Every structure is written in structure tokens, then in C-alpha cells.
Image (tube, helix red, strand yellow):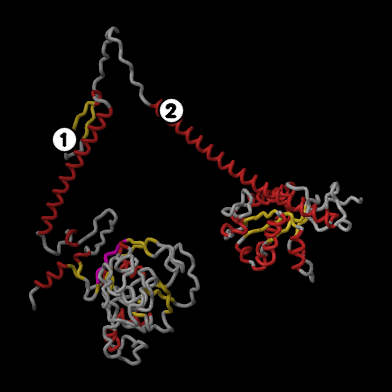
Amino acid sequence: MTSHPHPRAKVFISYSHKDIRWVERFHIHLKPLEREGIVERWDDTMLKPGSQWREEIKKAIKVTKVAVLFISADFLASDFIATNELPPLLTAADRDGAVIIPVIIGHSRFARTPSLSRFQTLRDNPPSKPLGSMTKANQEKVLVRLTEAIEKALNLNPVYLNSSVDSAPPNSKDTINSKTNPEAEAQRLAAAKAELRRADEERRRAEQERLAREAEESARQREAELEEDHTVETQQAITSTRRIPEAMPSDLPAVKPVEEPPPEIVVLTDGESVPPIVVPIGRYKRSTLIGMIALVILAVVVIFTLVHYGESNNKQSSSSTSSAGNSSSLTEQGADTSAGNLSGATAPPPAQSVVPPTGMAYVSGAEFTMGRDGDPTRYESPAHKVTVNSFFIDLYEVTREDYQKCVDEEECQPPSVWGSNKFPGGTAKLPVTGVTWDDANAYASWAGKRLPTEEEWEFAARGGKKGFRYPWGNEWKDGLANANSASKGLMEVGSYKGTSPFSMSDMVGNAWEWTASKLTAYKKGQPLPNKPPGDLRVIRGGSYIEDKNEATTTYRRGYPARGVSYDKTGFRCAKDMNNSSGRTENEVKDEKTQPQM
């Protein structure tokens, strides 16, 4: 009988063409095994022009002993792989015992794909550590392990599966001529397949046992380390503990006491407030001395505070009797003398002492959290800290009758939705809509105000540091705003009771509101998706057609400043503290007591 050369086991490589660089690198590591005649790789680069590729793939998979899958998101998304390569490979693994080795090259849904995740990945290449996230040295290390895994898979079983009898090992005593005894050949192939399945099961079981042993050993080692640390700490605690001397025998000779040196003297004083305090150090233990010093320092601080407080009261009393124009009275001027503001700039009066301009609310500035994490559109994300200065803002959206006054003075253009220079009858209290961003700015300037920035708008709507998602709280409540199918159109301003903590109405729903801000991604946030070109300005609050997920205090949208329809877009105005007619309560009282000329 003629002897035949040893057959080379077929290694089938499945990959997405977008990941070709990994396959090319793997070819280099596999080359020594190919040169030694141990393996013969196959991938779709082996297809020749004009060949029937479906048949070629089936033929290659039929004799595959090891299949290497380069897993990535592109691999899992490939319809070609899912239709033409994976089904026959999985069948070969289940029926013929082919070994499948996944190589994770990128983050993907591999772990959630049961048909693939049941196959063991390489030890250094779990789904959480793809090749793409490794250093080049570690990438090479994984590819070397891959070739070793292939060798191990081939050494598990000496039987080489092939459609030809000539491919059997040369020294096999069971070589049978399939032409003369087809039944025996079928039995041999069946036995070979059974042996492959048995070997594969043994490999899987051995791998599971190895992982279990490693986990158990790791837990045992960790427990030992914890126990050792505890023992060391206990010994250190025992060593550091002072030993209590044993009682001295009563029959020992008396010891002559050592004369103490003259006591050291410490003088504690604040210079003027209290007299010097003399403490003889030598006669007290150190702990007692420290306690005494602490008490003395505390007493000094208390006395100094009381004296300083009395002086401050005297100064304030004398200042209150001086004239109102005395510039030395910081209390009357409301100057900020805190450590955080040394510039001497006059701070705005407290919220309760400010009487805002008619129709406006006073918003006391502070730092707050703007935006919201978890926004799938990325427009509201990420949540970030912003500081807003104190300002005034309109209690209501600008109405049609308000805007009409600006139109009558020819300072504003009539909205397109009016159809003429005057709003339709019976709609005076509806919010003005159909205005461009330029129109809103023109009205604000005419009224001696401005548009609020989106930071100011959100701060006012959320109740400052309270950070509400809706003006009234964090849960939607029907009937508090003109949104979420509450009505079929615009409603008169102030019709709904869902005011913000600063008393503004309709901060969500009814009509969108222009802000002064351009639409940009939040700092440290991802780029905005599908952002159209042009001058986009932020609108806030939503209109009557928005649902409760968009009619919120954080939802934002970019809208062209000019050139489109604005039938659901209006605005409200804001005003700076340092350029306003806002007056303190004292100023209002003084005005009332002034004699009429």
C-alpha cells in the first residue's frame, strides 16, 4: 500500500473586510506552522476570480479543523458572514467537532450573542479587553497565544478529517480503500467524528476545571493575604502598647527623689485683650499642658470676638445716625466685604429687599447644575456647573397686546401669523408668536430689556439650586402646563398654575421661547447630532404640542434665527440688575414719604 504524506489541518479564518489588518498580522504568526506543513489556512483571499465562492466556502468549512473568528461590531453586522460563513461553521463545531476560537478585536455584542459567546476566548483576550484597546506588545502576545491554541487544538486528536481516504495519517492501521469497502469507510468517518466530539468535550471540560481551579486559588490567596495583614496589624498594635510595670516589692530600699529643675515658664498673651498667663511646664504632664493651652487659646478667641462684636455694634449705631449720603457706611450701601470679594464692588441687595420692575420677577443668582445626564439626543448632556448672576425676568411670555405697542411705534415688525398690522380680535392675552429672533431682540431693546441667556432661562425655570425637571418639581402633573395634550392651541398667559419657584408662568408649554444664546454642545459634551448649518439660536420650554419629555426645564432645541416658520415660537424678556429700575423696599418707602411738588 502506498504511503501518503501527512495532511495539513485546515484553519478557516472568518473576518470583516474592515478588519483586514488584524488578519494580515495573524498570517505572519501563522506562517511558521504553514511552512512546517502543520496547518493550511483558508480565508476569502484564497478565492480565485470566476470561482463559485459559495461552493468554495462550503468545501473549505467541510474539512476545517480550527476556525478563527475575528470578532468586532463590523463582524457581527456583516450579512455575508451571518448568512454564508457562521451557519456552516457552527454546524461543523456541533456535528464534526471543529474547534472555534473567537478573537476579540473590538467592543461589540459578542457577550450577548449566545451562538458565539459559548465558545471560549483566549485568556488574555476576553470581551472586555479587545485587541484594539491593547498596546502593540500585548497585541502580539495575544496573536502568539492564538497560534499556540491552534497547535493545542490539533494535538488533542490525531485524526484529520478529510473527504479522501488518502488524507489519513501514513502509519494508520485502519487505512481502507473506500472504493472497495465503502461501508467500512463510513464507519471509520463516523468513529473519527465521534472521537473529535469526545476530544472537544474533554477540552471544554478541562478548560472549565482550569478556570475553576484558578478562581479557587485566587480566592485562597486573597484570604491568606487578608489574614496575614490582620496578623501583622495585631502584632504591631501589641508591640506599640505600653507595658505596665509590675508593682515594686515593698522591701526594696527607699530611693532618694531627684531634684526637679527650675520650671520652665510659658507666657501666653494676645498683646492687649488679656493679661499674660504664666504656666509652669515642668510641674505638669504634657497632655495636661496641651489641654490648658487649648483652653487659654479658646478663652482668648472668645474675648477677642466679644470685644470686636461690641466695637462693630458701636460703629453701626454711629453710622445709622449719620446722613444717608455718608460714603463710609458700608452697611447702608450693601457693600460686600466678605473674604471672597475684596474689590469693594457693591453687591445687589438680598432677594427679599428688591422690588422688581413691574411685570418682572427678581432671580437671585447662584451656582447650579445645568443640563441633564442620560439624554439620548446629547443636546441636554452632560450635566455641568454654571454660575448665574442675579437678574430680572418677565413673569409672563410677551403677549400680543404688549407686542402691538412696539408695532404701533414702528419699532417692531408685525408677526407673519397676524396677517396685518394688528393682532386678531379677542387674542390680546395670547403669547405673541410668529416672531423671528431679530423681532424678539427688537422688542426687548424697545422695552429697555434683553433676551435671557439659556443659562438664565434654565436657572429661573428650575428654581435655582432646586434643579427641578419641571417648574413645580421633578414629576409631571397634568393641568399645570399647556403641554402633553392639555389643549389644542395657545392659551392666555398665566392660565396654568404650574409656576416656577420664582413665580414665572408658562416656563414650559404654551409657546417656545427665544433665548440670546447660540446652539452649541455643552462643555465636555459630545458633538451635537444632525446640527443644520446657519445661525441657530436656542429655544426653550416647548409649546402646546410637545409631550412631557420635551416640555421640561432642560430640553433645548436649536432653531434658525430667521427664514422659517415661527407660529409656535414666542419669548419673554430679562433685565440686568445694574441697569434696571428695580428698587429696594427702603427706596420705595422713601419715595412714598417724599413731599409732592
* Residue in front for this viewpoint, 561 or 45: 45
Question: Of all residues shown, which one is farthest toward the front?
Answer: 183
The secondary structure that dominates the magenta segment is: strand
Residue 243 visible in this rendered orientation of the protein: yes
Kindly identify the amino acid type of the residue bearing the numbered disc 2: Gln
Residue 514 visible in this rendered orientation of the protein: no
* Residue in front for this viewpoint, 330 or 351: 351
Mark 1 or mark 2: whose residue is earlier in sequence: 2
Residue 596: x and y in percent read 8, 77
**Numbered disc 1: secondary structure:** loop
* Left or right position of 212 against 540: right
What residue span does the magenta drawing correspond to? 361-366
Residue 261 position by quadrant: top left
* Residue in front for this viewpoint, 252 or 234: 234
Mark nearer the viewer, 1 or 2: 2
Residue in the picture at 37% in, 68% down? 554
* Left or right position of 147 against 561: right
* Left or right position of 533 against 451: right
Residue in the picture at 19% in, 38% down? 299
Q: Identify residue for label 2.
A: 235
Instruction: Please give the label number shown on residue 275.
Output: 1
Kindly identify the amino acid type of the residue bearing the numbered disc 1: Pro
